[in-house]
Amino acid sequence: MKQILFATIFALLLIPAATHAAIDAEMEGMEAVSRDDGTFLVGGPTYQYDRILGAGGLHTESELWTPQKLRQRLLFNRMSILPSWNPIAPSVWIKTGNELGDMIYQDLITETDRPSNRTPIMEAGFRTPSFKGFWATARGFQDDHFSARTAATRKKWVDDEFSLFGENWPMFSTAYAGLGFTNDFVNTSILAGTEYLWLYTASSRWIPVHYSPRVEARIDIAGLFLTAAYEDAEYQNFQKKEKGNRKEWNGSALYSCGSLCKNGILDGSIGVAFRTVEDSGIVYTKLEDDFVLWPFAELIIKPTKRITAAANFGGNNKDWLVQDSIEYRAPAPQNAGATIGIKNISGTRLNPLADDAELYGKTTIDLTPSGQMNLLQSYMQFEDTLGFMSIGGRATLWAEYGAETFEPTEFIDDGPLTYRKGDVERINEWIKGLTGEIWLGLNYQEMFAFKALGGFERIEGPEERYEVEPSEFFTAFTGDWLFRKSFRISHSLRYRSDAEWNLRSENPFVVKGDWYWDMTVEQQFPKQGLFLTGTLIHALTDEAIQIPNGDYDRIRLVCTVKKTF
Amino acid sequence: MISLKKILVFCSLIFATFAMAAEPLTEPNPADVAFSHAFIGIEGGEIYPFGDLIDAVYNSKYGGFGFRYTYWEDFDGFVHFNYTYFKVRADGIPFPGVHQFIGRLGLDWKWKSIRPLALGAGFTCNWTRADTDDESISGRGGMLTDNETEFGYFFRGNLPFIRTENYQAGLNILWENLWTLPERSNMLSIGIYVERRLW
């Protein structure tokens, strides 16, 4: 039966399709749920393991700080788009969804083996059209998925429902409102709101944080991008009668050469990011000296049309981080391309803005290993287009010395959850990796886009010391089509092989390989700016926990109505 | 694990629906047709739960309102909101009934070969809550004392039998399948509607 089902879905994928769009994320910042080009394991909206296969090294994408993430949120040691405080373009929207499998009337006749409660997702917001440049916005959003299994344990930490709505103890719940001004020269906004978050930390604990208020202001003017945020964060462990408070200022300033450099051989930017905190009571993490300042610069040089060299580097009195690459585009026939390049990442920390220690009772978990990491990577890529068909491939070879890992010294059980103590350390030996990806694309005008993609990775090294042993291979098929320029349907069918968490429990935690099928259906009314969208996520998949202390990844349906102005 | 058989049926029907939608149109731009006509309406009828739901609740009356609009020349879009009060049939449940609100979004295909009958499909969202203030109930029925929501899909036949310039009345026969656990839930609705043309 499963073969027939896959055959049917495969046939659906091949029906005429649209070239744009794909699966809509269930919430801004949760794109990893439907990604297929690596190992993506979701523990909930506030923690996602997102390792791109061709990126090289053992780290995940969100662990590595880059200047492009200046306006993302710092959740413990990860940069995260969610919960996003990026003002959305002028529109009004509402979103609701649920994990499938509530009983409803089955509840009246089901005596035994009763399924657990399924939980919703919800969002509503607006941004007004501009009135002489001025606009107003407000947004409330909350994701209750991935919360039911751990709620009974987590609720002991807090003295109320720890959310703006409902009693599911969701992993985050946010509401903000604000004003802005936008014209051809300046784009500025100030937002204020309140936010409940559960942070997944190195110890595998979910730490509750309540920001009230959180205020964020932004100004973009003449190549200068300024951001400042104030967060008054309440921490608590209700069961242990612990309380704490962190008042934090963070932000950044970035000057980008932008249009001034566009026609030259040199492009770049300079900037600085900072955090300063004032802690009282118990806040479960610590920032050394209560302050971090991170000056950085980016440089892109194109000495010829075929060579691009790029680098960004930053440093302060404690840490430094360099990321650079050089790429050569080989001569090729029209509609074809071949690129070879090398990349390097070196530094003392992947995220120099993150806290330096986690506090677990009287134990301090050191998050700043001594020494440095070095990642060297070479890659080559080719692509060719023959009419409606395109083919491409990419191969990389990488080696990393000093990769960050965790050295556990003790495991502690808390109901269904397991915590750990120890320190972040380094693997001071070379780890080597070889990756390959190949894809085939089919397109027909605006209606049709199909892509088949496959990839593998072979890693040599002390695998028992990897936090996560990534998937060895994946395959994915995506099909997007647009009927009569106003009805969109997108599919994504993919398989990922086993992944394994080695260091968060006594025995390895295996995430079994599985098939995933996502589908987005959208009625579009371009003239009216109206979009009615439904997305089915992770159909076919066995309900599974993807990270230690996480919750079940369930089939879910999310519906959105949006009217743009 | 989702029922593979039902997904297969669902996929096949979606396939058929959108294969029909792929037929070429004569209009230069479908977006110009959207909302060229719109109707509001009221509807009433009866819902017949079937399958294992027969042991859970009784057949019940429903009522509600809807909005229908031109999407393409040969397709209408519609939104329905209905209310039903289901009386409990199962023994040992400490409340008399369950409130249900339904929201539906779908498309009707006005296939010229079978006019005036139109065939439709779409998604449904059911919100339910037990008719009791007692939230301490455990075991059977306990989940319904808190809000319960579930999605599903439906297919329908829409047969207008009276048509004037500004009014339309017809018969709506609808089968819906809700993605509940441990089993999926099936219901059949038969109702009469009256619509008033807005523009």
Image (cartoon, coloured by chain):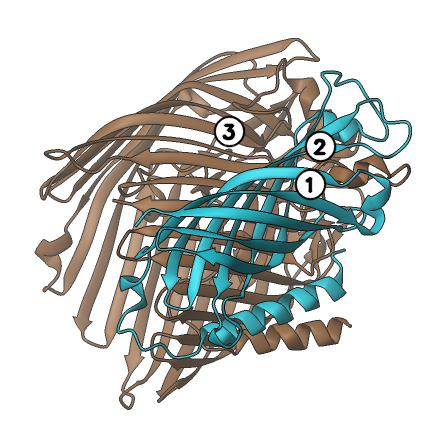
Neighbours of disc 2 within 10 Å: few (<14), some (14-19), many (20+) = some
Neighbours of disc 1 within 10 Å: few (<14), some (14-19), many (20+) = many
Identify the secondary structure beneath mark 1. Answer: loop
A375 vs A42, left or right, is left
Residue that appears at 66% across and 29% down: B147
Residue that appears at 49% across and 72% down: B111
Shown colour of chain B: cyan
Q: Could you tell which of marks 1 and 2 lies nearer the N-terminus?
A: 2
Q: What is the spatial separation of the Cα atoms under label 3 and label 2, in whole angstroms?
A: 16 Å
- Disc 1 designates what residue? A551
Shown colour of chain A: brown
Residue that appears at 85% across and 31% down: B140
Instruction: Chain letter for mark 2, please.
Output: A
Q: What is the spatial separation of the Cα atoms under label 1 and label 2, in whole angstroms?
A: 7 Å
Q: Could you tell which of marks 3 and 2 lies nearer the N-terminus?
A: 2
Identify the secondary structure beneath mark 2. Answer: helix
Q: Are marks 3 and 2 on the same chain?
A: yes
**Viewer-closest of A488 and A338:** A488
**Viewer-closest of A365 and A426:** A365
Q: Which of the 4 image quarters holds residue A219? A: top left
| Residue B62 percent across, percent down from the top left | 63, 38
Type of the residue with mark 1: Asp
- Disc 3 designates what residue? A173
Q: Which is closer to the viewer, label 3 or label 2?
A: 3
